[in-house]
Image (cartoon, rainbow, N blue to C red):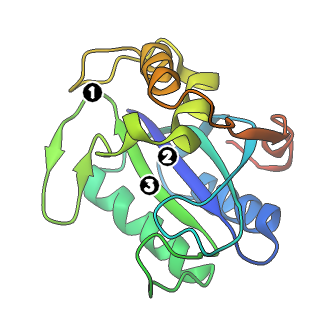
Amino acid sequence: MSVYIGFGTNLGDRLGYIKQALEQIAALPETRIIQVSSIYETAPVGFADQGNFLNGVCRLATSLSPDALLQALLAIEDHLGRVRTVRWGPRTIDLDILFYGDLIIRQSKLTIPHPAIADRGFVLYPLQEIAASFIHPELGESIASLVCHFQQRHQGEVPPVVVLQKVILNTVSCG
């Protein structure tokens, strides 16, 4: 199954946390990383009193169920020192399942597609880079179209800045 994972970090060695998270994702059973976007530097959303984030998106091929993948991603976050104290607060790593194929899941601990995709430039820009034609299963629009709508709603805002162009993939074993 083709799965898109969003990742972000704004504490410590941000690139180091991303690299470690991608390595651990690539090491999951029945899972391999197919593609990784560039890394974007973005201002925080929600809780503004914190440092800028590095964000990106990767595409996986996996046979893990959505629940098993979620548990594995939470374990990676824990292993990399993620502490949940403030909603949208600082973090060593954040890993979110954005899409799991075209599945729509609404559970108390798992919502797929991720509900905030269309409102988050830090997700849309890297997602467009690797999946511009992917159709959002609930909204029925391509990622490229969602980016256009986002840009119209946020005219005048500075878009995320690419800080590392697809170099990170070369340092991760992708199976």
Mark 3 secondary-structure assignment: strand
Q: Residues within 10 Å of mark 2 (few under 14, many from 20)?
A: many
Q: Measuring from the top left, give residue 76's x and y in whole percent.
A: 54, 71
Quadrant in which residue 174 is drawn:
top right
Does 118 sit above or below residue 52?
above
Name the residue tied to disc 3. Answer: 96
Mark 2 and mark 1: span between their CA atoms? 14 Å
Does 161 sit above or below residue 30?
above
Name the residue tied to disc 1. Answer: 102
Q: 112 or 70: which is nearer to us?
A: 112
Name the residue at 81% across, 66% down.
16
Q: 41 or 158: which is nearer to us?
A: 158
Q: Quadrant of the C terminus?
A: top right
Confirm or deny contact between disc 2 and disc 3 (CB under 8 A).
Answer: yes
Quick one: label 2 or label 3, which is nearer the N terminus? 2
Q: Quadrant of the N terminus?
A: top left
Quick one: label 1 or label 3, which is nearer the N terminus? 3
Name the residue tied to disc 2. Answer: 5
**Which residue lies most toward the front here?**
156
Quick one: label 2 or label 1, which is nearer the N terminus? 2
